[in-house]
């Protein structure tokens, strides 16, 4: 539950380091912190000696008075020596002064509630902190800039039509207020098209944000581990000419040609009496279930896929992509690679097509990317499509309810409706002190 009680938290991890940062946010901080220090001039880094219980810590202190601060409240930052014990003692001291430890994300939550930040920005911040690859980082940074212009424009365009449609429903017959559906559709067509573009951009961005789960399967010696190593850019899996080399499932996260991947190497699938190999094969199914895309590796020299393998892959037909390996030894149609030589261009094209819908990763910059955002965008597109399909003779209640629906969805998307549940979900993914 949000309160305005003063809060504090370490903003740096509890490991020995050069500097640790402790933040405090609340009202009347000058009074509250008076037993510990005299606050410096606003926004000027100043050295202060903090004294309590025999400790004396020289700290660099920054004071941002409300409302010109990250949270919109008074905000004080202490830069102290990066000793986790010292930080713990300082936070305990602040507790004695009536400043409790913040919950994860509580600083940002206050920024949001005080209008310092929008929901989309807060979500971008969470992804920025969690990003693990260059592309993820760039995408999150591009989203951290605030409300995208196309959403602002849509809101501006929508507002007068929502009002007009409501008036037509309420007073239409008596007052002669009519809704011109043709004008409405004309006004919304560019917006509808823009939303469709954003929808495909955001689907791709979502894949990039989460990292695509890619399972490599095939018969023994199909070249799975060779491809796994080539994509990972390191020798993680053992490669030999002995069929049945890989037994366990291996997992690695990597970025390959701008694509964040979570790769799974698996045991080759075949009829085998070797008990260890059978155990390895039993582990493949859960990997298939969890994968976004399954690469079925089939050597070019194999005339047809093995029936054991086909049976195992049948339930996942919708997400299987056949890749012909050993392209250096024979010709094959479709996606053909020679992983041991790093010849993987065909795979790159196929993956980008599958995951990004043919877009370059950079084309997703600024696109919405969280599951929440993508779901709301899908629903918005559905409403706009329905609006575009309305019969000219339909009663004004129909467009009115669609416009209302779209208006409400936009408010949920930007966080203007301030739904507590959305906020709780969002901030549970934050780290302390953010
Ligand atoms: N010529 C050629 N050899 C390859 C290619 N890919 C893999 N190999 C070789 O094929 C053999 C088997 O490769 P692996 O990557 O171990 O095959 P795997 O599918 O992981 O095999 P298991 O783990 O036993 O199921 C190794 O000797 C590789 O060097 C390729 O594209 N062309
Ligand atoms: Mg292997």
Image (cartoon, rainbow, N blue to C red):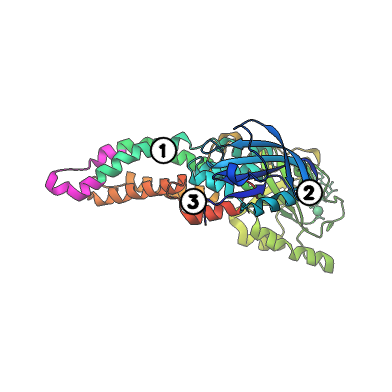
Q: In the rendered view, would you say 273 is above or below 120?
A: below
Q: Is residue 223 magenta?
A: no
Residue drawn at (46%, 53%), measured in percent from left and top?
419
Q: Contact (CB < 8 A) between labels 3 and 2?
A: no
Residue 293 on image: x %, y %: 64, 51
Residue annotated with mark 3: 375
- Range of residues picked out in magenta: 166-185
Residue annotated with mark 1: 193
Q: Is 241 on the left or on the right of 281, as rendered?
A: right
For mark 1, give the secondary structure.
helix
Residue annotated with mark 2: 54
The CB of the residue at mark 3 lies under 8 Å from ligand 1: no
Residue that extends furthest to the top in the rendered view of this protein: 44
Residue 89 on image: x %, y %: 74, 51
Residue drawn at (68%, 62%), measured in percent from left and top?
286
Q: Contact (CB < 8 A) between labels 2 and 1?
A: no
The residue carrying pointer 1 sits among few (fewer than 14), some (14 to 19) or many (20 or more) residues within 10 Å by Cα, namely some
| Prevailing secondary structure of the magenta residues | helix
| Mark pair 2, 1: CA separation | 67 Å
**Closer-to-camera residue (328/412):** 412
The residue carrying pointer 3 sits among few (fewer than 14), some (14 to 19) or many (20 or more) residues within 10 Å by Cα, namely some
- Residue 184 in view of the camera: yes
Q: In the rendered view, would you say 395 is above or below 37?
A: below
Q: Nearer the viewer, mark 3 or mark 2?
A: 2
**Closer-to-camera residue (255/342):** 255
Q: Going from the N terminus, do you reach mark 3 or mark 2 first? A: 2
Residue 166's tag is none
For mark 3, give the secondary structure.
helix
Q: Going from the N terminus, do you reach mark 1 or mark 3 first? A: 1
**Closer-to-camera residue (155/53):** 53
């Amino acid at each position: 539950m949000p309160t305005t009680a003063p809060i504090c938290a370490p903003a740096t991890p509890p490991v020995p380091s050069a500097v640790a940062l402790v933040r405090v946010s609340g009202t009347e901080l000058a009074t509250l912190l008076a037993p510990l220090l005299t606050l410096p001039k606003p926004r000027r880094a100043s050295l202060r000696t903090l004294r309590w219980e025999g400790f004396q810590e020289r700290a660099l202190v920054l004071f941002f008075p409300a409302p010109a601060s990250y949270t919109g409240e008074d905000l004080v930052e202490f830069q102290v020596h990066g000793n986790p014990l010292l930080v713990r003692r300082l936070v305990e001291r602040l507790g004695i002064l009536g400043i409790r430890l913040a919950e994860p994300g509580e600083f940002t939550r206050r920024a949001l509630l005080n209008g310092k930040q929008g929901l989309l920005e807060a979500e971008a911040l969470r992804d920025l902190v969690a990003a693990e690859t260059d592309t993820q980082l760039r995408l999150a940074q591009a989203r951290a800039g605030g409300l995208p212009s196309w959403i602002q424009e849509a809101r501006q365009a929508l507002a007068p039509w929502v009002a007009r449609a409501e008036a037509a429903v309420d007073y239409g017959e008596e007052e002669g207020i009519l809704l011109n559906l043709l004008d409405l559709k004309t006004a919304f067509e560019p917006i509808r098209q823009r939303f469709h573009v954003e929808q495909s951009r955001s689907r791709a961005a979502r894949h990039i944000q989460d990292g695509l789960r890619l399972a490599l399967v095939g018969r023994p010696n199909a070249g799975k581990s060779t491809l796994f190593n080539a994509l990972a850019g390191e020798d993680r899996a053992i490669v030999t000419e002995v069929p049945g080399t890989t037994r366990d499932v291996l997992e690695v996260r990597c970025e390959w040609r701008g694509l964040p991947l979570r790769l799974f190497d698996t045991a080759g699938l075949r009829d085998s009496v070797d008990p260890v190999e059978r155990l390895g094969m039993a582990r493949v199914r859960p990997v298939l279930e969890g994968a976004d895309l399954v690469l079925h590796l089939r050597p070019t020299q194999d005339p047809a896929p093995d029936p054991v393998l086909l049976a195992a892959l049948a339930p996942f037909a919708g997400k299987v992509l056949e890749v012909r390996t050993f392209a250096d030894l024979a010709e094959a149609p479709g996606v053909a690679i020679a992983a041991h030589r790093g010849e993987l261009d065909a795979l790159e094209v196929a993956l980008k097509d599958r995951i990004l819908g043919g877009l370059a990763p950079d084309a997703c910059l600024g696109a919405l990317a969280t599951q929440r955002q993508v779901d709301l965008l899908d629903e918005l597109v559905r409403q706009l499509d329905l609006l575009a399909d309305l019969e000219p003779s339909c009663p004004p209640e129909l467009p009115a309810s669609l416009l209302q629906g779209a208006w409400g969805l936009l408010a949920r998307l930007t966080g203007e409706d301030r739904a507590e549940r959305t906020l709780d979900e969002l901030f549970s993914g934050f780290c302390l002190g953010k």
